[in-house]
Image (spheres, rainbow, N blue to C red):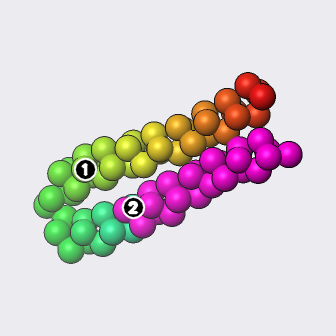
């Protein structure tokens, strides 16, 4: 029972990553709307930030799987 609870908490990392990626996407769209000539630089920074945020979600998911199956 404790393992399942710990795994559920570890999966909540994905929620934070999803909110972070959504916020970053919204702000990058605002920045592109204000300054269209900088769209390529903004997009490349957005992709890097989203990749880093998604990596934390994958790590949380991996920890949850390890907690469930290594018990």
70 left or right, relative to 35? right
Place residue 55 in its image quadrant. Answer: top left
Pick out the residue farthest to the right. Answer: 1
Q: Nearer the viewer, residue 53 or 47?
A: 53
Residue at 57% in and 42% down: 60
Mark 1 lies on a secondary structure that is helix
* Residue 25 - label: 2
**Residue 20: where, in percent of width, then height?**
45, 61
Residue at 39% in and 42% down: 51
**Residue 68: where, in percent of width, then height?**
76, 34
Residue at 39% in and 61% down: 25
Task: Please state the extent of the stretch shown in magenta in the rendering.
Answer: 1-24
* Count of numbered labels shown in the rendering: 2
Q: Main secondary structure of the magenta part?
A: helix
**Residue 64: where, in percent of width, then height?**
67, 39
Residue 32 in the image: above or below residue 39 = below
């Amino acid at each position: 029972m404790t393992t399942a609870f710990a795994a559920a908490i570890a999966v909540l990392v994905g929620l934070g990553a999803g909110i972070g990626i959504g916020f970053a996407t919204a702000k990058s769209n605002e920045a592109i709307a204000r300054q269209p000539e900088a769209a390529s630089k903004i997009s490349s920074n957005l992709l890097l930030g989203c990749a880093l945020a998604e990596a934390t979600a994958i790590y949380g998911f991996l920890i949850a799987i390890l907690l469930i199956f290594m018990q």
